[in-house]
Amino acid sequence: MDLKYIIKNDKYISVKQVLKEEFNISSRLYLKLKNSGHIFLNGTPTPYDKKVNINDIIEIDLNFEEDNSNIVSTKMDLSLLYEDNYMLIINKPAGIAIHPSIRHFDTSLSNGIKNYFDSINLHRKIRIVNRLDKDTSGIVIFAKNEYIQECLISQMKNNIFKKEYLAILERKS
């Protein structure tokens, strides 16, 4: 995924200013992009403090590999509800943990997502946007890169991203 911005006026002085103000890039992601050469000015890798001019094109390449070897890959049946280049939405059944832990070292939903990412040759960290308790079923969103995760979490914090819950109860005699 590329983020792209064309300088239309003299509001911005540097590439860094555009990244912070137009894309709301976090400091942590900004450092990763800067250090890995994934920031481009007019198609050429650029230093972050490079001066910009009207009609300059700033692009950010977010399609870089990440080490996800900290999670064991476990084949499991996943109920995929939606997937695109940016996110994966899963219907999580009750009884499965989201994160690996001592008790769920290789049986968590993240282990299944790691296996799925491996099967589609996607080398990215497992980035959970929302969480559910182990015994709760429902929708869990996984971002396919750090930028999308930050955007969705920011939307949740600012009440732009809405969640609704439906509970189904059954009375047993």
Image (cartoon, rainbow, N blue to C red):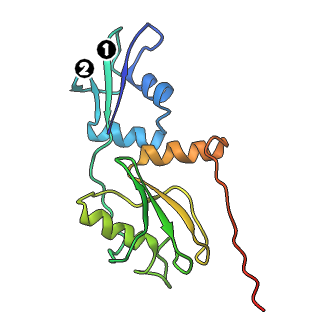
Q: Nearer the viewer, residue 112 or 43?
A: 112
Q: Residue at x 26, y 65 (%)?
A: 118
Q: Residue at x 53, y 46 (%)?
A: 152
Q: Residue at x 27, y 57 (%)?
A: 122
Task: Tell me if residue 69 can be seen.
Answer: no
Determine which residue is flagged by label 2.
42
> Considering only vertical position in the picture, is 60 above or below 147?
above
The reply to whether the C-beta atoms of the residues labelled 2 and 1 are less than 8 Å apart is yes
**Residue 137 in the image, given as x and y percentages of width and height:** 58, 71
**Residue 110 in the image, given as x and y percentages of width and height:** 43, 69
Instruction: Tell me if 4 is positioned left or right of 27 in this view.
Output: left
Determine which residue is flagged by label 1.
56
Q: Quadrant of the N terminus?
A: top left
Instruction: Check disc 2 and give the amino acid type.
Output: Asn
Q: Quadrant of the C terminus?
A: bottom right
Give me the C-alpha separation between circle 2 and circle 1.
6 Å
Which residue occupies the extreme front position in the image? Answer: 173
**Residue 13 in the image, given as x and y percentages of width and height:** 42, 14
**Residue 37 in the image, given as x and y percentages of width and height:** 26, 36
> Considering only vertical position in the picture, is 114 above or below 37?
below
> Considering only vertical position in the picture, is 61 above or below 77?
above
Q: Residue at x 67, y 60 (%)?
A: 165
Q: Nearer the viewer, residue 170 or 102?
A: 170
Characterize the local packing of mark 2: few (<14), some (14-19) or many (20 or more) Cα atoms within 10 angstroms: few
Q: Mark 2 or mark 1: which comes first in sequence? A: 2
Which residue occupies the extreme bottom position in the image? Answer: 173
Instruction: Tell me if 24 is positioned left or right of 169 in this view.
Output: left
Q: Secondary structure at mark 2?
A: loop
Instruction: Tell me if 63 is positioned left or right of 171 in this view.
Output: left
Instruction: Tell me if 27 is positioned left or right of 85 in this view.
Output: right
